[in-house]
Image (cartoon, grey):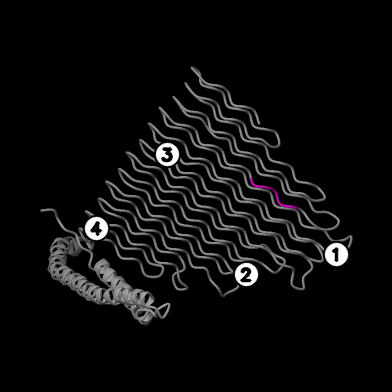
C-alpha cells in the first residue's frame, strides 16, 4: 500500500473550521424554523390552505433532515479531532526515542574530539558572547558560530567561527558604537569565519561601529573581512565601515572607517565575495562660540572584491564612503571632507570567470557657509573619490570588470570665496585574456559648484580584449577615457569617452 503522511496540526485546524461551520448552519436553521414551518394561507379557501400545508410540511421535513445531518456532522468532527490527536500521540511516541538515540550517538561521536581538540565532530559552533569569537563548527559537518557584537568592555566585534570539512563560516560581529564619551572611536567589525575545507561559504564580515561627537571626533571602526572558503563555495562579503563621529568645534570630524575585503572564493569553484562600503565621514555642525568652522571627515575607502580560484567570478569592489560636510562659522568656514576611494574588483578564476567590477568613489562633502563679512571665507567642497579599477577576465574565457565611477565633488559655499571640490576620476576596466570583452571605463563625476567650480574628473580607459572580443568603451566626463582595443582575431574597439 502507499505510504500515508498526516499532519496533526492541519487535522486539528480542519476539525475546528468544520465545527464552526456546523454551528453557523444550526443557528441559521433555528432562526428560519418559525417562519418556514408555519406558512399562513394566502386566503380562506381550501386551495390556499392546502398549499400552505404543503410548504409547511416540506419545511418540517427539511428541519428533520437538517437535525440528522447535524448529528452526522458532529460525529465526523469528533472522529477528525480524535484522528488528529491519535496521529500527534503516535508522532510524539516515535519522536522522543529517536531524538534520544540521536543525541546519544552524537555524544558518543563528539566526546573524543571534544576532549582532545575542544571541537565536536558534528555540530554547529556556538555564537560568541559580546566581543568574543564564535565557536568553530564540527570537524566533519557543521557551521561556525556568529561572532559576538562589540560592547563597551570589548568594543571590537568577535570573529565568526570556522567550519570544518562541510559547512558555512560564521558571520563576524558588529563593532560597538559608543553613545557616550567625547570623540570615542567605534569598534572594529569581526572577520567572517572560513567556510568548509571541502564545501561551504565564508561568513560575512561584521560592520564597524560609528564614532561619537567630540573634539576631536571619533573615527568610525574598520569592518571585518569576509570569510574565505575551501575547495568549493562562495567567499563572504566584506563588512561596511563605520560612520565617523560628528563635530561641533573648529577641528576635524572623524573619518569613516575603511570597509572590509570580500572573502576568497573556492579554490576549484566559487565566486569571490563583494567588498564592503566605506563609512561616511563625520559632519561638522555650526561652531559653538568659535569663529572658524571644522573640517568634515573623509569618507572611508571601499573594500576590495574577493578573488577566486580556478573557476568563478571575482567579487565587486566596494564603494567609497561620502565625505562629511564642513562646519558653518562667522569666520573661516570648514572644508568638506574628501570622498572615499572606490575599491578594485576581485580577480576572476585562473581558467574561467569574469573580473569583478570596481567600486564607485564616494562624493565629496560640502564646504561650510560663512556668515561673516569680507574677512571671512566659505569652505571648499571636498574632492570626490576615485573609482576602482575592474579586474581582468579569466585566462581562457571571461569578461573584464567595469571600472567604478568617480565620486561627485562637494559644493563650495560662503562669502567671498569657496571653491567646489574636484570630481573623482573613473577607474578603468581591464580586459579578458583569450576570449572576452574589455570592461568599460568608469564615468567621471562633475566637480562641485562654488565661486570657483571644481574640475571634473577624467573618464577611465576601457579595457582591451585579447584574441577574441570587443574593447571596453571609455568613460565619459572631463577628458574622456580611451576605448579599449578589440581582439587580435575578432572584435571591435571600444568607443572613446
The residue at which mark 1 appears reads as: 372
Give the label, 2 or 3, closer to the camera.
3
Front residue of this view, candidates 268 and 218:
268
Q: Which SS does the magenta portion mostly show? A: loop
Which residue is located at x 67 percent, y 47 percent? 408
Q: Secondary structure at mark 3?
A: loop
438 to 230, vertically: above or below: above
Q: Is residue 79 left or right of residue 342?
A: left
380 to 353, vertically: above or below: below
Q: Secondary structure at mark 1?
A: loop
Cα distance between the residues tagged 1 and 2: 26 Å
* Residue 355 x, y percent position in the rendering: 47, 36
Instruction: Say if mark 1 contacts mark 3, CB within 8 Å.
Output: no
Give the label, 4 or 3, closer to the camera.
3
Front residue of this view, candidates 239 and 214:
239
Whichever of labels 2 and 3 marks the residue nearer the N terminus, that label is 2
Whichever of labels 4 and 3 marks the residue nearer the N terminus, that label is 4
Which label sits on residue 313?
3
Q: Is residue 361 left or right of residue 18?
A: right
Query: Which region of the structure is painted magenta?
Result: 407-411
Amino acid at each position: 500500500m502507499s505510504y500515508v503522511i498526516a499532519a496533526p496540526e492541519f487535522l486539528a485546524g480542519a476539525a475546528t473550521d468544520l465545527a464552526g461551520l456546523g454551528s453557523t448552519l444550526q443557528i441559521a436553521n433555528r432562526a428560519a424554523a418559525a417562519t418556514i414551518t408555519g406558512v399562513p394561507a394566502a386566503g380562506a379557501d381550501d386551495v390556499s390552505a392546502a398549499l400552505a400545508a404543503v410548504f409547511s410540511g416540506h419545511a418540517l421535513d427539511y428541519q428533520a433532515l437538517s437535525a440528522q445531518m447535524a448529528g452526522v456532522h458532529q460525529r465526523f468532527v469528533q472522529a477528525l479531532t480524535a484522528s488528529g490527536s491519535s496521529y500527534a500521540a503516535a508522532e510524539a511516541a516515535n519522536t522522543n526515542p529517536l531524538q534520544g538515540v540521536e543525541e546519544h550517538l552524537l555524544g558518543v561521536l563528539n566526546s573524543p574530539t571534544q576532549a582532545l581538540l575542544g571541537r565536536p565532530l558534528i555540530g554547529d559552533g556556538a555564537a560568541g558572547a559580546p566581543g568574543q569569537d564564535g565557536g568553530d563548527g564540527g570537524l566533519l559537518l557543521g557551521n561556525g558560530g556568529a561572532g559576538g557584537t562589540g560592547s563597551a568592555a570589548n568594543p571590537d566585534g568577535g570573529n565568526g567561527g570556522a567550519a570544518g570539512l562541510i559547512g558555512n563560516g560564521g558571520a563576524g560581529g558588529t563593532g560597538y558604537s559608543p553613545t557616550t564619551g567625547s570623540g570615542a572611536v567605534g569598534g572594529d567589525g569581526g572577520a567572517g569565519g572560513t567556510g568548509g575545507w571541502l564545501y561551504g561559504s565564508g561568513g560575512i564580515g561584521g560592520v564597524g561601529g560609528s564614532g561619537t561627537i567630540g573634539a576631536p571626533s571619533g573615527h568610525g571602526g574598520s569592518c571585518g573581512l569576509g570569510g574565505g572558503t575551501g575547495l568549493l563555495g562562495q567567499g563572504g562579503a566584506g563588512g561596511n565601515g563605520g560612520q565617523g563621529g560628528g563635530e561641533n568645534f573648529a577641528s576635524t570630524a572623524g573619518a569613516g572607517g575603511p570597509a572590509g575585503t570580500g572573502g576568497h572564493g573556492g579554490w576549484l569553484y566559487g565566486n569571490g565575495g563583494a567588498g564592503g562600503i566605506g563609512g561616511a565621514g563625520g559632519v561638522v555642525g555650526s561652531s559653538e562660540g568659535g569663529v572658524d568652522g571644522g573640517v568634515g571627515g573623509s569618507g572611508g575607502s571601499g573594500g576590495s572584491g574577493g578573488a577566486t580560484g580556478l573557476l568563478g567570478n571575482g567579487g565587486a569592489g566596494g564603494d567609497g564612503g561620502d565625505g562629511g560636510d564642513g562646519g558653518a562659522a562667522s569666520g573661516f568656514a570648514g572644508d568638506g571632507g574628501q570622498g572615499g576611494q572606490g575599491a578594485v574588483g576581485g580577480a576572476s578564476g585562473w581558467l574561467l570567470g569574469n573580473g569583478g567590477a570596481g567600486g564607485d568613489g564616494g562624493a565629496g562633502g560640502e564646504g561650510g557657509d560663512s556668515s561673516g563679512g569680507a574677512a571671512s571665507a566659505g569652505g571648499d567642497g571636498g574632492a570626490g573619490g576615485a573609482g576602482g579599477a575592474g579586474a581582468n577576465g579569466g585566462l581562457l574565457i571571461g569578461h573584464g570588470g567595469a571600472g567604478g565611477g568617480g565620486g561627485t565633488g562637494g559644493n563650495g559655499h560662503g562669502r567671498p570665496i569657496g571653491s567646489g571640490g574636484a570630481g573623482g576620476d573613473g577607474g578603468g576596466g581591464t580586459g579578458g585574456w583569450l576570449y572576452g570583452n574589455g570592461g568599460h571605463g568608469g564615468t567621471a563625476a562633475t566637480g562641485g559648484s562654488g565661486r570657483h567650480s571644481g574640475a571634473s574628473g577624467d573618464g577611465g580607459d576601457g579595457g582591451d580584449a585579447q584574441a577574441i572580443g570587443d574593447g571596453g568603451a571609455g568613460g565619459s566626463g572631463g577628458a574622456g577615457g580611451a576605448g579599449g582595443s578589440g581582439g587580435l582575431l575578432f572584435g571591435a574597439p571600444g568607443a572613446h569617452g
